[in-house]
Image: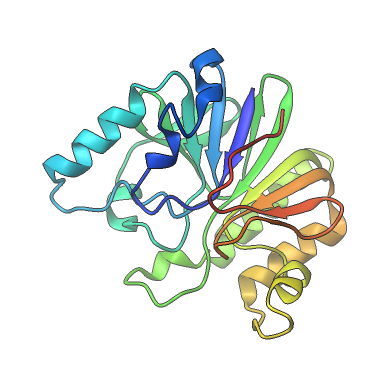
Amino acid sequence: MIYITGDIHADPKRFSTDGFPEQKSMTKNDYVIICGDFGLLWDQPQSSREKHTIDWLSQKSFTTLFVDGNHENFDRLNALPIEEWHGGKVHRISDSILHLMRGEMFDLDGISVFAFGGARSHSWWQQEMPSWEEMDHGLKTLKAHGMKTDFIITHDGPASDVAILGGGSFQQDPLTKYLERIKQTVDYDCWFFGHHHMDRRVDSKDFVFFEQISRIA
C-alpha cells in the first residue's frame, strides 16, 4: 500500500492511530509519502523533543518517505550519508524514515515513483531551490526510464497547476517552469505535490495535498 499526504512541518500528529486508522493493517513494506516540508531534522543540535518525535514516527507500522520542501534544515539533511534504496538515492533518517533525493526514480513493489523536492520561499537555506545540476539530473533520470513513470512526487507543482491554484497571482520561477517541462513531456499516471496548504484536485492527473491522507496504490 502507498499513501500520500502533504506538509507536516515537524508535527506528524495526523499519523495518530485515531487520525489514520488504516495503519493498523499496514507493515513496513507499506509506505506513506510526504510531499515536502517534513521538518523533523531541524534542531541543531538535535533536541530531545525532536528525537522523541522521530522515534515515535519510526515505531509506526509503515515506512515514511518524503521529498524535501523549502522548510528543511538542509545543512543537517545533506550531511547524511547517501544510500541506494529501491533503485534511487536516499538519506536515511531512521530505519523507516527516508528522504527521497531530488531527481531520483524509485521502484516501490513494481510502481515507479519520480521524486523531486524543493520550492522557492524566504528561508535560510539556498538549497531550498534546486540547482541546475539537480534539474539536469532529473531529466537524465527520466530519459533513462523512457520518459515514463507511474507517479511524480514533488513539493511545488508545475507552472500551469500553480497558476490554477493561485488564480493567476502566483509568479513562475525556474523550478515551476522546470516541472512544467516535465508535465508536458513525461508520460505519467498521477502527480502529487504539497507546498500550497490545500487539498485539491488540480486537473485529471494532478493533485495538491496538505492534511489529507489518501491511498494511491
Identify the image quadrant of residue 80. top left
Image coordinates of residue 139 in percent, x first then y, are 71, 54
* Residue 103 visible to an observer of this rendering: no
Q: In this view, does 77 lie above or below 150?
A: below
Furthest-front residue in this view = 18
Q: In this view, does 193 lie above or below 52?
A: below
Q: In this view, does 159 lie to the left or right of 42?
A: right
* Residue 31 visible to an observer of this rendering: yes
Q: How many marks?
A: 0
Query: Which residue is at 44% across, 18% downward?
Result: 61
Q: Is residue 54 above or below residue 160?
A: above
Image coordinates of residue 9 in percent, x first then y, are 38, 54
Q: In this view, does 24 lie to the left or right of 168?
A: left
Image coordinates of residue 125 in percent, x first then y, are 35, 68
Identify the image quadrant of residue 3. top right
Q: Is residue 39 above or below residue 176?
A: above
Query: Which residue is at 66% across, 27% downward?
Result: 107
Give whichever of 169, 199 is nearer the camera: 199
Image coordinates of residue 58 in percent, x first then y, are 34, 26
Query: Which residue is at 36% across, 57% downward?
Result: 72
Query: Which residue is at 60% across, 61% downward?
Result: 198
Q: In this view, does 18 lie to the left or right of 93?
A: right
| Quadrant the N terminus occupies | top right
| Quadrant the C terminus occupies | top right
